Image (cartoon, helix red, strand yellow):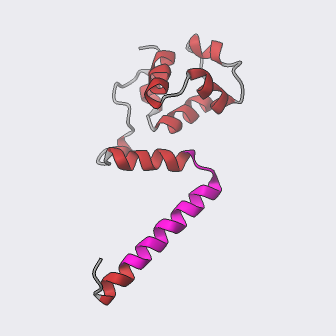
Amino acid sequence: MPICERIENLCVNEGISITQLCEEVTGSRGNLSTWRKGNVRNDYLIKIAKRFNVSTDYLLGETDKPLPIASEGLTSEEIEYIKLYRQASPEMQVAALAMLEAAEKARLTRDASGEDK
């Protein structure tokens, strides 16, 4: 399957157009015609892979397994959390981690004191 077709399928699954993705990744629509010809710059390819949580090997057609090896064993819900985290601004990432750390600290304190959950 050509690279552009794989990218388009990922876009459809996410409910966005390839034009929207092109603007998100490159800042303009101008690169879309080169993508359709199968020419995607390496830095854009990496951004697209991160955006969809797939390997660059998958985008390039080297494998039909979309998820990188590191995601094996994760639930679909965990993968979705990771995708949302990656798409968030650095400030939102810090806030999300702080919230999770606070929740875990509260759980540990509750467990140590023997309180019910």
Q: Is residue 104 left or right of residue 94?
A: left
Residue positioned 72% across, 25% down in the render: 28
Of 72 and 8, which appears nearest the observer?
8
Of 81 and 37, which appears nearest the observer?
81
Indicate the position of residue 57 as horizontal and vertical percent values: 43, 28
Q: Quadrant of residue 58?
A: top left
Q: Is residue 79 above or below residue 64?
A: below
Q: Is residue 31 above or below residue 109?
A: above
Residue positioned 69% across, 21% down in the render: 29
Q: Is residue 5 left or right of residue 30?
A: left
**Quadrant placement of the N terminus:** top left
**Would you say the magenta stretch is mainly helix, strand or loop?**
helix
Residue positioned 38% across, 31% down in the render: 66
**Quadrant placement of the C terminus:** bottom left
Question: In the displayed image of the protein, which residue is found farthest to the bottom?
Answer: 113
Indicate the position of residue 110 as horizontal and vertical percent values: 35, 83
Indicate the position of residue 114 as horizontal and vertical percent values: 28, 87
Residue positioned 41% across, 72% down in the render: 104
Q: Quadrant of residue 113?
A: bottom left
Residue 22 on the magenta span: no
Range shown magenta: 87-107
Q: Is residue 41 visible?
A: no
Q: Is residue 96 visible?
A: yes
